[in-house]
Amino acid sequence: MAFAATEPSKSPLLILLVSGVAFLLLASAVECYGGGRPDVTRSAMARRSGVGSRRQYVRHRRTGGAVAVPHRYVLAEKGSNSTRANHTSPAASNSTPSATTTEAPGKHHHSHKHRVRNWIIGFVVGSLAGVISGLAMSVLFRMALNCVRGRYRSKSDTVIFIPKLIKSKEHLAFLEKDQDGLASLAVIGRGGCGEVYKAQLPPEREGDAPRFIAIKKIKKRSGDGSGQNNNLSDEESRQLDKWTRQIQSEIRTVGHIRHRNLLPLAAHVPRPDCHYLVYEFMKNGSLHNALKATTDTTTNDNNNKNSGEQPQPPPALPWPARLRIAVGIAAGLEYLHVSQRPQIIHRDLKPANILLDDDMEARIADFGLAKAMPDAHTHMTTSNVAGTLGYIAPEYHQTLKFTAKCDVYSFGVILAVLGTGKEPTDKFFAQVVDDVGIVKWLRRVMQEGDPAAQAGVIDGAIAGAGYDEQILLVLRIAVFCTADDPKERPTAKDVRCMLSQIKN
């Protein structure tokens, strides 16, 4: 999925070697085209003068057959009559040779075959030289492009994907030291894969506003620590090396993905016991925090004072902002499913993984990092069930495989949360509706068709503001996305088109 990284010291030598082979093949092709062709003018002059051959073939007047005669008799035919008479042998007194000389039978055919062979060899060698030259030029072009964009690999394997944000690897040098480098940083999030820290970058110029980054620390799998590798068997060591290469490839692939509704990876710093993924800091937080601001404003205010963050969005996120966020999520999901080959499946789409930029546009985070997670089932462990269990498609529990339709199901639950203001694990479903869950509860209300009941599912913070019709249409799309049969669910592209029509 990613481009294979080569050592900087070996790449120029490899390019020079390939270029040299290409030029040698090209020179051979030119020689085959030019040097292998017979000199027609020189051959004609030799035939007229008789130089270079002891015998010539002439055609007998009476018999019409080709008779080999010594070279001196042919020259005699081109002189006067007296000269021809003086040099005519007794054996040839009854016949006069023709003045027109011809080449030996089969000689012209042999020359034609030789010419065709040279043309074929020249064509093959020239084509091969062109292909090798093209490959060499493409590699050189990619190296130059990577240098311009700043996607380089340092000796410490630190990779910077956004040089506009991180000017130099020296800005991340504290991550290459021991764990004390993170001790002074504020923790802004925790999850099954590790903690998320907030760090400040040095200003570009004196007096500039401070710049912040978010650093996600992903713990490696058990048995992947530097101090435990000695106890691994040969087979386990090979599997570990393979897994490490897959992580490197996966992270580098994610680092090159760009879309306005995806949170790009700014840098990657590998460590023996963990991976540091660096992102641009989103001061407006996550969609989960924005939706919970109405009931958790006190906690958010305390966090803002401790971490120095900007104030969170207004307590009641208005419906136009929610609809714009929904359209952005659908657009980003469509890009991962349709525009990427092979397609990228998020696997853990939820409001906590939807970040909001300065314009309150949705940015999908943590996409394309399935191999980098410490456990493929981390999001289903008992320590993390409360936040994400309600977003997992039901078929996953049977097949244990994620598909694009699993992401569509998770997105349908997000739409339900945006319209109703209720999380899948809300106490409302256990106390009021007999623990059927948000999906079955919303499906039942929308299928019954009772206008009063449908109006009652709308979030009270946005109900009655003139958008109830749009909200109910979005909730119907949520029901489509959360169908039990994956084949009945729409694609991410279909959902984006439907939401765009509602928005416009």
Image (cartoon, rainbow, N blue to C red):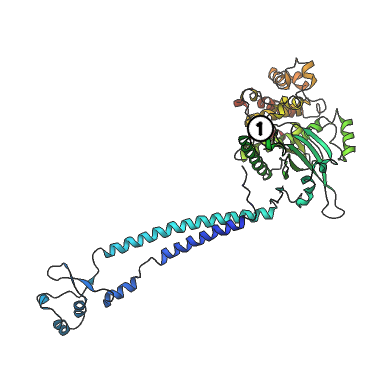
Residue farthest top in this picture? 434
Q: Residue, x 77% and y 46% (percent of image)?
A: 176
Count of numbered badges drawn on the protein: 1
Task: Say above or below: 114 vs 72.
Answer: above
Residue 138: give x, y in percent of width and height.
Answer: 58, 54
Residue 255: give x, y in percent of width and height.
Answer: 69, 44
Q: Residue, x 52% and y 55% (percent of image)?
A: 132
Residue 277: give x, y in percent of width and height.
Answer: 74, 42
Q: In the image, is 29 to the left or to the right of 439? A: left
Residue farthest bottom in this picture? 82
Q: Quadrant of the N terminus?
A: top right
Residue 55: give x, y in percent of width and height.
Answer: 22, 73
Callout 1: SS? helix
Q: Quadrant of residue 284?
A: top right
Q: Quadrant of the C terminus?
A: top right
Q: Residue, x 27% and y 74% (percent of image)?
A: 47
Q: Quadrant of residue 309?
A: top right
Let me know if residue 111 appears in the view.
yes
Let me know if residue 504 appears in the view.
no
Q: Is residue 409 or residue 398 the one in the foreground?
A: 398
Q: Is residue 439 or residue 420 the one in the foreground?
A: 439
Residue farthest front in this picture? 231
Task: Say above or below: 35 vs 212.
Answer: below
Q: What crowding class fits label 1: few (fewer than 14 Cα within 10 Å), some (14-19), or many (20 or more)?
A: many
Task: Say above or below: 359 vs 487.
Answer: below
Q: Is residue 76 or residue 233 the one in the foreground?
A: 233
Residue topped by disc 1: 495
Q: Is residue 471 or residue 381 the one in the foreground?
A: 381
Q: Amino acid at mark 1?
A: Val
Q: In the image, is 500 to the left or to the right of 170? A: left
